[in-house]
Image: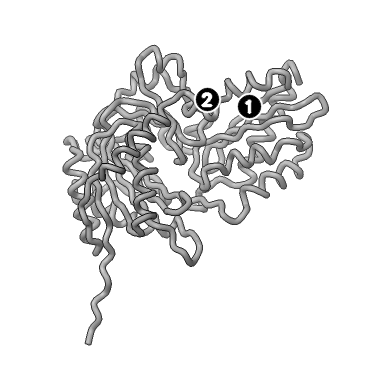
């Protein structure tokens, strides 16, 4: 007698058109629901309002002119607990998807495994909508010819759940508007075949020469999930979830959230010290800031960058660990960084393309040199 294999079932939520605050609040709300119910939750959505989306670890002042954003009426949000860099989205120009699954009680966290499970589903969906030429570069980026980026996928450890999800550019954004407010960090495109932002961003419309609607992509993605042997139980947000989403949206809309990591604020708070800030582009862009006292000791530090790492306080703890170190002692600086970055419980998806201790150390030593060269140094 042949035993039938148990079929995995995910709850599916069609979130539709959302603004930046709703989109980011959904992750917190649905992650809690996935953990409580012990079942994976899959969701899809599309941007419903033009905005700039700042990465959790980004130094907002290094990537955006916030005064220009305010003058032009562009909404700005910092993604809560999610890495990556700053991105610009016009209403309707990108579709998103995400899966939250309860963390297994036994065994280690395997973020690469979660991405590997989602990759063939995404590639199947792309083929269904005429985007079969698009491939993954590493495990994270969806690229077309000449290294042009069409979208991406990432995974993270968020306490009680693991999350894997991504986005796909479906229509060209207004890059003229974006370029009025963006500050492209040093070496952002150092390792890219395409050096100009206008050429770097690619869309589904560029690839297949016709528009791709949210509904077409959603249906293709759901078809690919089903073809992978996963059942979908459709269930919209409950009243409790909707209320929680509104509460969280209001909380993350404040200026304090946007300026969580801010080099302008760092300089102002440590004006009595010699302050230096610097970037280092390893596999990902790393940014460091240091404030040195008169004896050359790190009085305060700031760590930032375009990266995905969990838990979400990891870079904050690296910055805290640097306080009290001799700025001219690279061995001590490295040991303090490694004590946090290489500890159990710190995870990066696609470790071969992740940030290393030495990447962070290089950013810090560059910042130290900049502080020493400052008028106060």
Task: Find residue 293 and name its label.
Answer: none
- Which sits earlier in the primary sequence, circle 1 or circle 2? 2
Residue 10 picture quarter = bottom left
Colour scheme of this structure image?
one colour
User: Is residue 281 left or right of 224 when viewed as pictured?
Assistant: right
Q: Which residue is mark 2?
A: 62
From the viewer's perspective, is residue 9 above or below residue 280? below
Q: How many marks?
A: 2
User: Is residue 94 left or right of 280 when viewed as pictured?
Assistant: left
> Marks 1 and 2, how far apart in space?
10 Å
Q: Residue at x 55, y 25 (%)?
A: 262
Q: Residue at x 35, y 32 (%)?
A: 21
Residue 226 picture quarter = bottom left
Q: Position of residue 94 (x, y in %)?
A: 28, 35
Q: Quadrant where the C terminus lies?
A: top right
Q: Position of residue 325 (x, y in %)?
A: 76, 37
Q: Which residue is mark 1?
A: 277
Q: Are marks 1 and 2 in contact (CB under 8 Å)?
A: yes
Residue 49 picture quarter = top left
Q: Residues within 10 Å of mark 2 (few under 14, many from 20)?
A: many
Q: Residue at x 35, y 50 (%)?
A: 33
């Amino acid at each position: 007698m042949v035993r039938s294999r148990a079929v995995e079932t995910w709850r599916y939520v069609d979130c539709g058109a959302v603004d930046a605050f709703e989109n980011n609040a959904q992750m917190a709300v649905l992650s809690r629901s996935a953990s409580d119910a012990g079942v994976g939750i899959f969701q899809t959505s599309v941007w419903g309002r033009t905005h700039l989306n700042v990465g959790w670890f980004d130094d907002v002042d290094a990537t955006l002119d916030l005064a220009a954003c305010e003058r032009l009426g562009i909404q700005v949000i910092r993604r809560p607990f999610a890495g990556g860099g700053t991105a610009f989205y016009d209403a309707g120009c990108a579709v998103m998807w995400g899966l939250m699954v309860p963390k297994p009680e036994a065994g280690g966290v395997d973020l690469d495994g979660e991405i590997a499970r989602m990759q063939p589903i995404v590639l199947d969906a792309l083929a269904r909508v005429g985007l079969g030429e698009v491939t993954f570069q590493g495990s994270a980026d969806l690229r077309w010819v000449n290294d042009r980026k069409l979208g991406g996928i990432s995974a993270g450890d968020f306490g009680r759940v693991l999350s894997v999800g991504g986005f796909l550019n479906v229509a060209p954004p207004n890059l003229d508007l974006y370029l009025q407010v963006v500050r492209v960090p040093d070496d952002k495109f150092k390792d890219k075949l395409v050096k100009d932002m206008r050429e770097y961003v690619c869309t589904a419309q560029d690839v297949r020469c016709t528009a791709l609607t949210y509904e077409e992509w959603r249906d293709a993605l759901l078809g690919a999930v089903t073809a992978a042997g996963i059942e979908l139980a459709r269930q919209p947000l409950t009243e409790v979830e909707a209320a929680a989403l509104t509460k969280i949206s209001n909380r993350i809309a404040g200026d304090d959230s946007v300026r969580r990591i801010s080099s302008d604020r760092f300089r102002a708070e440590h004006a009595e010290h010699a302050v230096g800030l610097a970037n280092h582009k390893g596999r990902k862009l790393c940014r460091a800031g240091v404030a040195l006292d008169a004896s050359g000791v790190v009085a305060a530090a700031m760590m930032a960058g375009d990266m995905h790492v969990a838990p979400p306080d990891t870079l904050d703890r690296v910055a805290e660990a640097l306080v009290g170190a001799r700025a001219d002692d690279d061995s001590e600086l490295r040991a303090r960084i490694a004590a946090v970055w290489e500890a159990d419980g710190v995870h990066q998806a696609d470790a071969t393309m992740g940030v290393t201790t030495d990447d962070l150390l290089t950013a810090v030593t560059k910042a130290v040199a900049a502080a020493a060269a400052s008028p106060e140094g």
